[in-house]
Structure formats: structure tokens, C-alpha cells
């Protein structure tokens, strides 16, 4: 639907008609990183299929985990900056709900 | 099926003729899980592309991280069971080197 | 200085002038948990001193790590609820700085 | 000071005659680090008691978690080097049991 890298998709609120949540600061960058992550997952599959040395496979798994973690932290930062800050400004139950939701997501990340 | 690399290097004693490192206990199972992991990575790419809700994307990232972690722990267990135990039996510098290598891989996993 | 459980210290935003950072929702609860964590650390020291079985020591280290993690997630939730939400309401550079600071702390937790 | 168990296996140079599991390579070093960890836990308790700034507390929690993690990785390395390697040499069910036990401890560490 949206071509990766199309430049104006992640401008929140300006002509961003079909995006559900236009909060992602640098979407093209995330898409490129996730493309790479998908390639890393495919590479690990191939390494197991070729029965490469276990320790080398584990090194690639650690690298992939770190890359994912870094994407997650970036998305979370964007989320705090936009959704949580906006909700805080509106106040009330909405602000509380957004903070709770963010805290739960952080707990899942810390524990995974 | 598996070609690359030199044959039967550390085959732990069971007619596992063409595997480079025939230590993986249930290869088909790992391949299926890694296929699924690749699909999860692709799904996260799509969610970002479609600008789905950040918290939902983070939930998928946590699930993918857990799936990867579980593959890594399985591979590490296989590695300890086969390569490290075999090296321990041979003893000497080889045993020490294998334990050091395993410890380093564990440290990378714990820290990633 | 402040007695654990003293009631009005952590009321955010109501006559909260002398608390350094009166954001902690249930201070007595945190203090009790941290007391327990200190005891767990002392217990691990004793286990190593008595050269108890390594795996049993590691089990205690994992339990302590989980207890700490849980305290950290609670404090972070309190922080988002109070400091970050308050800063968001004020807006401007202060809001940005608080979010950045929180994101950095989250990254340290996820990576530790 | 330490009583239980068998004598002076790998006592790092200090008449530590009767350890149960003399596998710890540099016990004095671990004891010093665990002492420091206990002090860090006490420091965090004090910071919460004094209601210091949440982010500063979280920074100390991350530092403590890292210190603990590093102790755990050291103990695990010692364990693999001694208990697991020894069990591997004996072979049989004992070797399998030790590897399983180590893998379970690693999984707890990775997940905590």
C-alpha cells in the first residue's frame, strides 16, 4: 500500500490520510532497518539449514536481538513523544490510560 | 541437502554424514521456528509501513524477541550437549577453548 | 529523614513543596522491597562465601535481578505518570527534555 | 569462616580449607564484588527514602543489574569449566543432568 521510503508518509497530520497513527518520526529509516532485520532472520535460517557452527549462529541471533531492541526503543521514544505527551495534555483518564499502556509495553520489552 | 563446508567435522558419533556441525537435535523444528520468526519480522515491517498503533508494534517486537531467545537457548543447549561435552572428554586446551567460547556466547545473549 | 510510610510525602502536586521529588506512589512498599533486595544480595554473598552450589547461587541471582527489575519498572511508571505527564502539560523544551531523559533510562533498563 | 564441604580445591591462595563446591576461581574477588552490590542495594534504598530524582535512582538500578549480571556470568563460566567439564568426562546420565541444569540456569539468566 505505502511504498517504503516514500518521503511524506510520516508527517503526522499533514496529508497523511490513510495512516492510522502518523507518529513515526522517520518511517523510511525504520522500514530500512526492519528490512535488514528480516534479512538477518533469513540468514539465521540459512545458517541452521547449512548447519553452520552453533556459536556463529548465536552471534547472529544476538546481533538480530540488538537490532530489534534498538528499533523498539526508537518506536517507544516516538510513542512517548507523541501519543503520551498529547494524551498528557488532554489529561484525565486518557492520559492515565496512555501511561499505563506505555508502562506495560516497557515492562514487556525489559522482560523479553 | 546441506552442502557448504567441510564434511563430518564434529559429528557426535551418529551417521550424520554430510552435516558440517551435526549437533542440532531437531533441525526441522528450528527451521520451522526460524521461518515463523522471519514471518514475524516481515509482519512488523508491514505494521510500521501501515503505521499501525505503536504499542501493537511493540507487542509484536517483544513476541519476536522471545521467539528468538527461545531458539538461541535451544541451540546453546545443543551446543553444550554436543560440542562442549565432546571437547571436555578430549580435555586440554580444546576443552578450555570450547568453554570460553560458550561463556562468551552466553554473555552476549544475556546482555542482548 | 523521611519515615517510610509517612503519608503526605508522595502526593504529587498538592503542597508537595519540600519533598525533593514527591512522585513515588507507594514509598513504604518500595522501601520494603528494597530492604528485601538488600537481604537477597547479602544472602548471595553468604552463599558464595560458603561455596554453596553454583546453580543455586545463580537461581538467587536471577530472583534478585527480577525483583530489581520490578522495582525499576514501578519507579519508571511513577515517573511517567508524574514527572513526564506534568512536563508534557507545561510543554516546550521541558517536555522534550523529560521524554528524552525517560527514553534514555528505559534504554538502559532494556539493555541491562 | 566458611566451613561446609571438601577441602581447598581451587582456593585462590587463601587457606579456605573446607568448601563444599570448591569451583569458584577467585572467591575473594566475588566476595568483594558482592559486598559492593550489597552497598549499591543499600544506596538505592536510601535514594528512595530520600526521594531523590527517579531517573538517578533508575541509573543506579541499571548499574546494580549490570554488576549482578557480570557476577552471574563469571560464576556460570566457573561452573561450566569445573562442574560441567568434570561431569562430561564421567559421561552418562550425570553429564546430561549437569548440562540440562546449566542450560536451565542460563535460560533463567537470559530471561531475567
Image (cartoon, coloured by chain):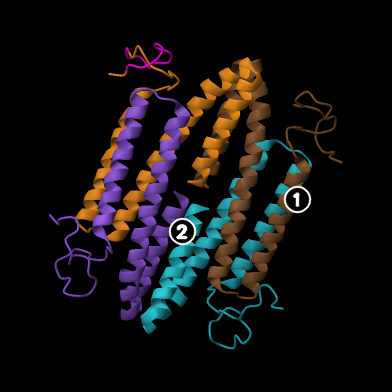
Chain colours: A cyan, B brown, C purple, D orange
- C51 or B20: nearer the viewer: C51
At 32% across and 50% down in the image, what residue appears?
D60
Q: Position of residue A21 (x, y in %)?
A: 56, 79
Main secondary structure type of the part rendered in magenta: loop
In the image, residue B100 sits, relative to residue C103, either above or below, namely: above
- B86 or A26: nearer the viewer: B86
Subunit that carries the residue with mark 2:
A
**Can you tell which mark lies on residue B57?**
none
In the image, residue D5 sits, relative to residue C47, either above or below, namely: above
* Residue ID for mark 1: B32
In the image, residue B4 sits, relative to residue A12, either above or below, namely: above
| Residue D26, image quadrant | top left
Subunit that carries the residue with mark 1:
B
Q: Is residue C56 left or right of residue B55?
A: left
Q: Is residue A98 left or right of residue B53?
A: left
At 53% across and 73% down in the image, what residue appears?
A25
* Residue ID for mark 2: A107
At 55% across and 81% down in the image, what residue appears?
A11
Magenta range is D3-15
**Rounded to the nearest whole Å, what is the CA distance between mark 2 and mark 1?**
28 Å
At 38% across and 78% down in the image, what residue appears?
A88
Total numbered labels placed on residues in the image: 2
Residue D66 is at least partly visible in this image: no
Alpha-carbon neighbours of circle 2 within 10 Å: few (<14), some, or many (≥20)? many
Q: Position of residue B85 (x, y in %)?
A: 64, 24
What SS does tag 2 mark? Answer: helix
Q: Position of residue A12 (x, y in %)?
A: 53, 82
Residue C20 is at least partly visible in this image: yes
| Residue C27, image quadrant | bottom left
- Residue A61 lies within the magenta run: no
* Quarter of the image that includes the N terminus of chain B: top right
Asked whether the beta carbons under mark 2 and mark 1 sit within 8 Å of each other, the answer is: no
Amino acid at each position: 500500500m505505502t511504498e517504503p521510503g516514500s518521503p511524506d508518509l510520516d508527517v503526522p497530520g499533514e496529508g497523511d490520510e490513510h495512516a492510522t497513527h502518523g507518529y513515526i518520526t522517520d518511517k523510511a529509516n525504520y522500514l530500512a532497518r526492519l528490512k535488514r532485520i528480516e534479512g538477518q532472520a533469513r540468514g539465521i535460517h540459512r545458517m541452521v539449514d547449512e548447519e553452520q557452527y552453533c556459536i556463529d549462529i548465536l552471534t547472529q541471533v544476538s546481533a538480530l536481538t540488538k537490532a530489534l531492541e534498538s528499533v523498539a526503543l526508537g518506536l517507544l521514544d516516538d510513542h512517548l513523544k507523541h501519543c503520551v505527551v498529547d494524551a498528557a495534555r488532554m489529561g484525565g483518564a486518557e492520559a492515565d490510560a496512555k501511561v499505563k499502556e506505555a508502562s506495560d509495553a516497557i515492562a514487556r520489552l525489559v522482560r523479553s
